[in-house]
Amino acid sequence: MDLKLLSEVETPCYIVDENLLIKNLEILDYVQNNSGAEILLAQKGFSMFYFYPLIAKYLKGSCASSLFEARLGFEYMKGRECHIFSPAYKESEFNEILKYADHIVFNSLSDYEKFFPLILKSGKDIEVGLRINPEYSEIETEIYNPCSKNSRLGIKIKDLKEIPSGVSGLHFHTMCEQNSDVLKRTLKVVEQKFSKFFKNLKWINFGGGHHITREDYDREELIKIIKDFKKRYPLKVYLEPGEAVALNTGYLVAQVLSVVKNSCDIAIIDASAACHMPDVLEMPYTPKVLNSSDKGKFEYILAGPTCLAGDVVGRYRFDKKLDAGDKIIFCDMAHYTMVKNNTFNGFNLPDIDVIDKNGKLITVKKFGYEDFKNRLS
Ligand SMILES: Cc1ncc(COP(=O)(O)O)c(C=O)c1O
């Protein structure tokens, strides 16, 4: 990819590289073909619907966390499966969800009891599932741990006496940016606790958090785990990664607005951690920046333009001094960025650009004052 292109765009701007996305989709398709599992795009991580027709060529469909995501998946991944899971559904939305979703997963038996009659009444051929909480997870960051104490996510084995009528699948999601060894250990617990129900089911969903497209991810082990599982139980297996679909496919390009001094140099840029890369603060993590390295002679804190004192991306070293107008290119910015961004302080949202498979730069979306105003009253 031509890095010069990245530095020519108006800032701030997310840029997604179609060839890198295709590379990830080919890896995911390899896993599908060799394991027999079916893979869905978790839209919560990456909802760039410009690419949904491309993604639909490889993946079995999408999964949604809400009515709007379900509608987006339905509209832009035509003919593909549309799954939905919500911790609690809203009565006023459920009939519309029935228009889009072909798999509906309930988080509790009470939600199942409340909404299953509506599914029956719709006369639609909808697969119904229950989310389970295996009470096993290896996630250390508490806010990302669905099995934390007092988690609201999923039904524990002590509360599931039998599979209720009309339920054809179980769903668990207990992983985050993890490798296949974690799935292996998790699956062991899931089987110990829940396999007594498998004979009454058609499918099981292993959720997201599988970092399948990461360089050191053990894909052959994942394939083996799924194939062995399918030998033990004749169930269709779904995976629903978000991050793995868009991992390392995009950038956020910003420019330096001003350099100020405290005990070190601070470059204020026109992209914000708080608005445009909130996981930097929430996870927290420090994204890679092109052309920065530990050996660089000049150290800067890169910080956003909002009023939030903590709107800081991190400390970086560069070979040359930074000046106003210099471009800063953050890596791996396609997932959990556009889906989470906001206009705090009235800052505009970054453009969304694509480098298409022929290397051409296309601006897919620009935002402006109306987008900011329309979320207010
Ligand atoms: C139910 C469910 N499925 C899928 C995902 C996608 O996870 P990831 O983007 O880490 O693969 C999440 C993320 O929180 C989730 O909660």
Image: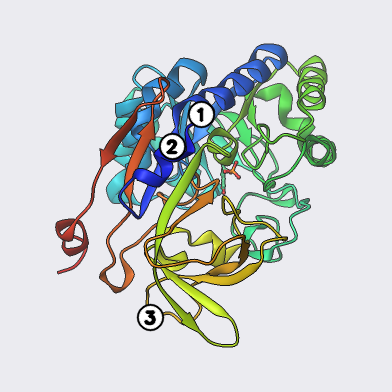
Ligand 1 visible in quadrant: top right
Give the side of residue 183 with respect to residue 350, left or right.
right
> Residue at the spot x=47%, y=33% of the render?
2
In what element is the residue under mark 1?
A: helix
Residue closest to the eye, 21 or 229 = 21
Give the side of residue 62 with respect to residue 241, left or right.
left
Q: Is residue 90 visible?
A: yes
Q: Of the residues shown, which amino acid type is indicated by label 1?
A: Leu
> Residue at the spot x=65%, y=12% of the render?
33
Check contact, mark 1 vs mark 2: CB within 8 A.
yes
- Farthest residue to the top: give it: 33
Q: Which residue is mark 1?
A: 21
x and y percentages locating residue 288 in the rendered image: 61, 53
In what element is the residue under mark 2?
A: strand
Q: Residues within 10 Å of mark 1 (few under 14, many from 20)?
A: many
Quarter location, residue 100: top left
x and y percentages locating residue 163 in the rendered image: 64, 34
> Residue at the spot x=29%, y=28% of the render?
75
Asked whether mark 2 lies closer than 8 Å to ligand 1, one says no
Q: Residues within 10 Å of mark 3 (few under 14, many from 20)?
A: few
Check contact, mark 3 vs mark 1: CB within 8 A.
no
In this picture, is 302 found above or below 3? below
Q: Which residue is mark 3?
A: 307
The number of callouts visible is 3
x and y percentages locating residue 276 in the rendered image: 42, 59
Quarter location, residue 151: bottom right
x and y percentages locating residue 205 in the rendered image: 63, 32
Q: Of the residues shown, which amino acid type is indicated by label 3?
A: Cys
Q: Which residue is mark 2?
A: 16
Real-space Cα distance between discs 3 and 1? 35 Å
